[in-house]
Amino acid sequence: MKNPYVDILYHPTGRIIQKRKLYELDMKKVIENAVKEKVALEINSFPDRLDLRDEYIRMAVDAGAKLVINTDSHHKDHLKYIKFGIGQARRGWAESKNIINSLELADLKKQLNKNK
């Protein structure tokens, strides 16, 4: 996350539901570093992932981390999965102010160009 070209950490825990467990990592440290380095954490909406889990979203919100909701679309029909990411965000108590891709365009550009 210290790389100046990293704005978002995708697949933070690497899970694939019923196929691959979460990476063994200290999520509290990941979140702390995301806040420190101003890197958003992905909430992946794809039904097989739903990564981040709601408890980690809550930890991120409480720590002041920014999040992004992504459909992980590999086909146009996958765009509908956004509803699952929004559901995950709500279960984790995230609000629109915590989600960078709900910002106004100018504010989103500032967030994504923080180190450039």
Image (tube, helix red, strand yellow):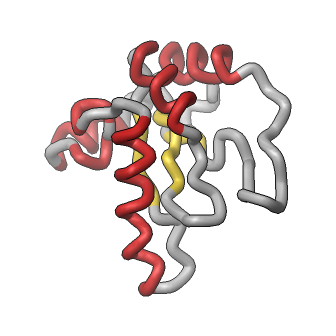
50 displayed left or right of 65 = right
Residue 23, image x, y percentages: 81, 38
Total number of numbered labels?
A: 0
- Establish if 74 lies above or below 22: below
Residue 16, image x, y percentages: 73, 57
Picture residue at 79% right of the left edge, 60% below the top: 18
Depth check: give the residue in front, 35 or 89.
Answer: 89
101 displayed left or right of 91 = left
Residue 39, image x, y percentages: 50, 30
99 displayed left or right of 52 = left
Picture residue at 49% right of the left edge, 38% below the top: 7
Picture residue at 53% right of the left edge, 54% below the top: 44
- Establish if 106 lies above or below 36: below
Quarter of the figure that contains the C terminus: top left
- Establish if 48 lies above or below 87: below
Depth check: give the residue in front, 86 or 103.
Answer: 86
43 displayed left or right of 16 = left
Quarter of the figure that contains the N terminus: top right
Picture residue at 44% right of the left edge, 28% below the top: 115
Residue 5: quadrant of the picture:
top right
Residue 42, image x, y percentages: 51, 44
